[in-house]
């Protein structure tokens, strides 16, 4: 009897040790996959593109925004981004500059042509909607390893291929998400689908990324991003055209002085 | 024919019972399909114009279904370090509310400030902020001067604060969703209440109302139905003095109720605040049928008849009256189909079906049951009340010359009081002051503005039009006009945000607290502001997708439905007059209730003549006399007229529940007239004069009439105990009308006949 008991205890502890080990392994595997994703996308330098944003209400009404974006890869820190608004007409010429940081708050400025001044956005709130769309600012910010804790969940078929399913828990306490789950295509380690869970852990949004194309024989970029809000029924399409690399932009084009000149 | 059918019932009683049971089981199986809905939208049909306007506004802007937590500290100051940190914690916890999409509170209000060229946007109170006396004074100063939160999220006295949780239900199982949401918040506030015993919490808003609708209906079902059963048993004991007779009656009532509820389930009707009382109404109406049948049988048994003959005797006397009275009652209930309120139509259809089922069961199943059960003759001898009736008859005959004018005068006087009634439908006032929901809402209304509100949507007609200075100016002057109206407590308009942003963009210079001068200025300030707002606190509840329209939220003092529709008209005509270039609309739940009362009353008043005509026709047919049909009009119309007159003097407020009472009660009170006139006519046709015929009518049906009236009054009085005023008012007024009908049938109708029906009967009609 005693023997039996100790055997089962031993078995039990063995099982839990194995469980623990797999959990650790999954976190390690999650991080490894995320690292691979980051590595594969490293070295793109700088890029430019045109973006159309189509906002859709639950009733099917649509509204369109147009903007031009430029991005600069920064080694050892978050990327820098510049967005110039073209439509709607009343915000034409407004320019948005962003310096992402893996752990600290991003720095953000807005150039307002009506005032002819650069204003710093002094807010911790990066969780709000971008231009009234279903994309939060944090959904569009550059992918940094330090922003999340990763956990590998499983492999799953997705689209035409196979995906890693990774759970990402935001490190930022001001994030509006309790977690996000990303489906990364095994061929290029880029997300095909991301689901977002709100602070009460209910499914909030699903992002679908389509029309991936290969640039510079190395970098995969999606051309259509659709964000669907499951709670409000609203959705936003982000259509990206004309991606160009090696545009010759430097860090000087991404500071607040350049912001005033940006056209 | 009647004979043949009766014989077959009595020859094969087991087969009849078995058949009834099978039928009941088949119909009753539908009960499993019955679901309960406690959502205020069940008051409105899908094509209700105010509901459509409301839904359109909810589609253009965010939903506004909400639950409001009122926070009242004992020291009467929410701007203390302790209370503010409570609000901070509760706000944070409130984000966990199931289906919540937005939480607004005093602490997470997004305060904006300029700091040189920075636009600071952030929570008014945050975790990291030290709450020293100076900071508290600053927070108080900002909060009480910010038009968008004062009187909405904090009382202007600083005594009460509120957290408003906006929810968006997936609407898969709305009952469950309301229940989950409400219970979560209730548990949350209970927890905080234990932690902070000196602080009171009150729950308001649409979700709290929906929850109260469901829980009060459940309360009705749990208390009123058993109480009604008890009353029925007591009444049966008094009336029949026979356990077996009472048992048979209860069996009939139960199978009638089970079948009715089951049929409702099969028909896809759901239970609601009103239909939950169908069992109570059916018990009241069905008991009379059974009592008539059993009492007649007991009479025959006492006379020495054997059981079969006693049942035959009873059936022959009762088939026609039971059928006619059930039909008129059913017609009365069926007129509720003309109501604008779907759940009142459901109440009518279920009651009408139930009454006809009860009629069928008491004419088919009851005789078979009585045949098999060991029923003995009643222990009570024919009571002395026939001598009471005889004396009443003598009195009426003696004094009819005096009675007629006096009764007429009383009738006219009470009828004149009808004009004191005003239609009023306020959802909050549907709940009795004893209910927790009503108490919370009354408290919240005292300090904030919780129950009455109207949202106005103003559309510029072009994309990004809300950035046009002239449009902002229109919004601004409209919101100022609104604020000047005496009924208005609070206005939330985007124009205030534009003015504040303009000030912030110019280093907080108060001189810039005005509307931006160019559309691109306005648009860029707004863009900057929107990029600074956190998740869930965006402007989607004030601006539509392409920024062509804005929503202006107006909170009003607690006011009647008439005043709120009047206010809507006034505000819309202000806009039409001053800003005809912009299209405007108004919507809110208060407006929906405000309009439905009048529309419902109008449609019910239109159907009343139809009901009266149908019932009089049925009456004339059953009495086989047009003349009698015509004579019956006065005693059929008068009770409702007097009843509403009494109501005008007693309360003067007519809600949805009362607007259907006139046609509903008509079907019930007409029974008294039918019985009385039938006996009277029978005696006249036998050649007796008016006096003798009146006396005969009194002695033969007088007792039965007051007994059924007593049963009905008791039954409808049970409804008065409901905490839901649609039900309790309906019960009270119906009881008053039924009582009035008996008085008129005893004092006015015979006096009228004695005066005007004096011709000796020569011809048979």
Image (cartoon, rainbow, N blue to C red):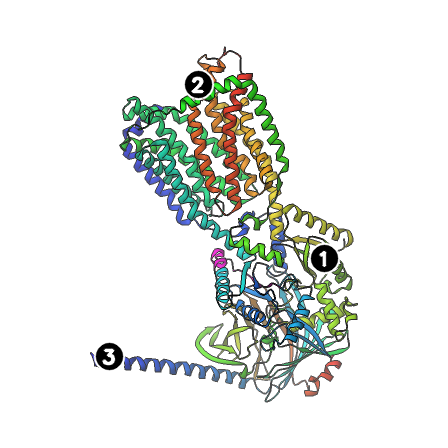
The stretch in magenta equals B159-179
Q: Residue furthest left?
A: A1
Residue B80 figure quarter: bottom right
Which residue is at the far front?
B75
Q: Secondary structure at mark 2?
A: helix
Question: Badge 1: how crowded within 10 Å, few (<14), some, or many (20+)?
Answer: some
Tell me the SS state at disc 1: helix
Q: How many marks?
A: 3
Specify whether A2 is left or right of B142: left
Residue underneath mark 3: A5
The image quadrant of residue A18 is bottom left
Q: Which residue is mark 2?
A: B696
Q: Are marks 1 and 2 on the same chain?
A: yes
Question: Residue B24: x and y, percent?
Answer: 36, 41
Q: Which residue is mark 1?
A: B483
Q: Chain of mark 3?
A: A
């Amino acid at each position: 009897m005693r023997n039996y008991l100790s055997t089962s205890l031993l078995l039990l502890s063995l099982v839990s040790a194995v469980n623990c080990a797999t959990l650790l392994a999954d976190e390690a595997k999650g991080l490894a996959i995320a690292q691979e994703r980051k590595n594969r996308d490293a070295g793109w330098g700088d890029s430019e593109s045109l973006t159309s944003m189509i906002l859709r209400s639950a009733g099917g009404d649509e509204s369109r925004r147009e903007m031009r974006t430029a991005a600069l890869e920064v080694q050892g820190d978050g990327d820098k981004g510049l967005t110039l608004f073209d439509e709607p007409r009343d915000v034409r010429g407004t320019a948005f500059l962003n310096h992402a940081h893996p752990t600290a708050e991003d720095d953000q400025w807005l150039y307002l042509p009506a005032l002819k001044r650069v204003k710093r956005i002094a807010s911790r709130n990066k969780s709000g909607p971008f231009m009234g769309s279903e994309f939060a600012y944090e959904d569009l910010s550059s992918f940094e390893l330090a922003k999340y804790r990763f956990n590998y969940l499983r492999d799953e078929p997705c689209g035409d291929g196979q995906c890693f399913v990774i759970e990402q828990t935001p490190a930022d306490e001001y994030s509006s998400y309790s977690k996000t789950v990303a489906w990364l295509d095994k061929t290029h380690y880029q997300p095909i689908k991301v689901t977002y869970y709100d602070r009460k852990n209910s499914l909030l949004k699903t992002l679908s990324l389509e029309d991936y194309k290969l640039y510079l024989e190395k970098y995969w970029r999606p051309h259509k991003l659709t964000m669907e809000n499951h709670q409000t029924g609203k959705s936003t399409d982000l259509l990206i055209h004309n991606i160009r690399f090696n545009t010759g932009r430097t860090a000087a084009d991404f500071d607040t002085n350049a912001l005033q000149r940006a056209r | 024919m009647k004979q043949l059918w009766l014989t077959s019932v009595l020859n094969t009683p087991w087969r009849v019972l078995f058949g009834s049971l099978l039928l009941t089981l088949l119909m009753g199986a539908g009960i499993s399909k019955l679901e309960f809905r406690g959502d205020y939208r069940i008051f409105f049909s899908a094509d209700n114009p105010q509901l459509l306007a409301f839904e359109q506004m909810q589609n253009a802007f965010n939903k506004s279904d909400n639950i409001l937590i009122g926070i009242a500290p004992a020291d009467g100051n929410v701007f203390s370090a302790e209370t503010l940190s409570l609000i901070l914690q509760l706000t944070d916890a409130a984000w966990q509310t199931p289906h919540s999409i937005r939480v607004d509170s005093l602490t997470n209000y997004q305060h904006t400030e300029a700091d040189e060229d920075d636009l600071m946007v952030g929570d008014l109170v945050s975790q990291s902020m030290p709450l020293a006396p100076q900071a508290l004074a600053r927070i108080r100063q900002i909060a009480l001067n910010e038009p968008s939160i004062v009187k909405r999220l904090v009382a202007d006295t600083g005594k009460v604060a509120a957290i408003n949780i906006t929810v968006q239900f997936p609407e898969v199982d709305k009952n469950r969703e309301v229940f989950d949401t409400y219970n979560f918040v209730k548990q949350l506030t209970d927890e905080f209440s234990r932690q902070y015993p000196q602080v009171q919490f009150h729950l308001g808003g649409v979700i709290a109302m929906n929850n109260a609708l469901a829980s009060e209906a459940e309360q009705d079902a749990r208390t009123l139905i058993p109480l009604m059963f008890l009353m029925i048993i007591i009444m049966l004991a008094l009336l029949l003095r026979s356990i077996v007779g009472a048992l048979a009656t209860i069996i009939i009532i139960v199978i009638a109720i089970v079948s009715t509820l089951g049929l409702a389930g099969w028909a896809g009707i759901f239970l609601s605040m009103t239909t939950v009382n169908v069992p109570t109404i059916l018990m009241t109406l069905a008991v009379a049928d059974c009592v008539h049948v059993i009492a007649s049988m007991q009479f025959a048994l006492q006379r020495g008849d054997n059981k079969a003959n006693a049942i035959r005797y009873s059936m022959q006397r009762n088939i026609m009256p039971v059928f006619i009275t059930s039909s008129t009652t059913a017609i009365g209930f069926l007129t509720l189909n003309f109501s604008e309120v779907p759940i009142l139509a459901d109440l009518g259809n279920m009651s009408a079906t139930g009454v006809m089922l009860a009629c069928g069961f008491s004419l088919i199943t009851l005789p078979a049951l009585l045949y098999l059960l060991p029923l003995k003759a009643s222990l009570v001898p024919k009571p002395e009340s026939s001598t009471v009736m005889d004396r009443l008859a003598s009195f009426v005959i003696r004094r009819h010359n005096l009675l007629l004018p006096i009764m007429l005068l009383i009738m006219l006087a009470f009828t004149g009081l009808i004009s004191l009634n005003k239609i009023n439908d306020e959802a909050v006032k549907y709940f009795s002051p004893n209910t927790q929901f009503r108490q919370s809402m009354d408290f919240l209304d005292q300090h904030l503005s919780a129950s009455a509100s109207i949202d106005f949507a103003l559309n510029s007609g072009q994309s990004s039009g809300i950035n046009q200075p002239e449009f902002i100016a229109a919004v601004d002057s409209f919101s100022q006009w609104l604020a000047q109206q005496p009924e208005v407590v609070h206005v939330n308009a985007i124009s205030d945000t534009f003015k504040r942003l303009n000030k912030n963009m110019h280093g907080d210079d108060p001189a810039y607290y005005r509307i931006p001068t160019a559309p691109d200025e306005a648009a860029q300030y707004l863009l900057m502001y929107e990029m600074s707002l956190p998740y869930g606190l965006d402007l989607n509840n004030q601006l539509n997708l392409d920024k062509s329209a804005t929503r202006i939220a107006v909170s009003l003092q607690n006011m009647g439905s008439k005043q709120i529709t009047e206010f809507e008209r006034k505000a819309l005509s202000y806009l039409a007059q001053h800003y005809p270039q912009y299209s405007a609309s108004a919507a809110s739940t208060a407006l929906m209730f405000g309009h439905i009362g009048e529309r419902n009353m109008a449609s019910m008043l239109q159907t009343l003549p139809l009901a009266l005509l149908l019932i009089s026709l049925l009456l004339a047919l059953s009495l086989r006399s047009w003349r009698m049909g015509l004579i019956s009009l006065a005693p059929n119309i008068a009770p409702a007229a007097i009843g509403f007159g009494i109501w005008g003097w007693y309360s003067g407020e007519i809600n949805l529940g009362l607007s259907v009472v006139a046609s509903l009660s008509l079907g019930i009170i007409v029974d008294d007239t039918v019985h009385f006139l039938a006996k009277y006519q029978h005696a006249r046709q036998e050649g007796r004069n008016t006096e003798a015929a009146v006396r005969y009518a009194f002695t033969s049906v007088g007792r039965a009439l007051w007994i059924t009236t007593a049963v009905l009054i008791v039954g409808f009085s049970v409804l008065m105990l409901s905490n839901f005023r649609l039900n309790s008012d309906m019960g009270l007024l119906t009881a008053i009308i039924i009582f009035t009908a008996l008085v008129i049938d005893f004092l006015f109708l015979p006096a009228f006949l004695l005066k005007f029906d004096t011709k000796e009967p020569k011809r048979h009609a």
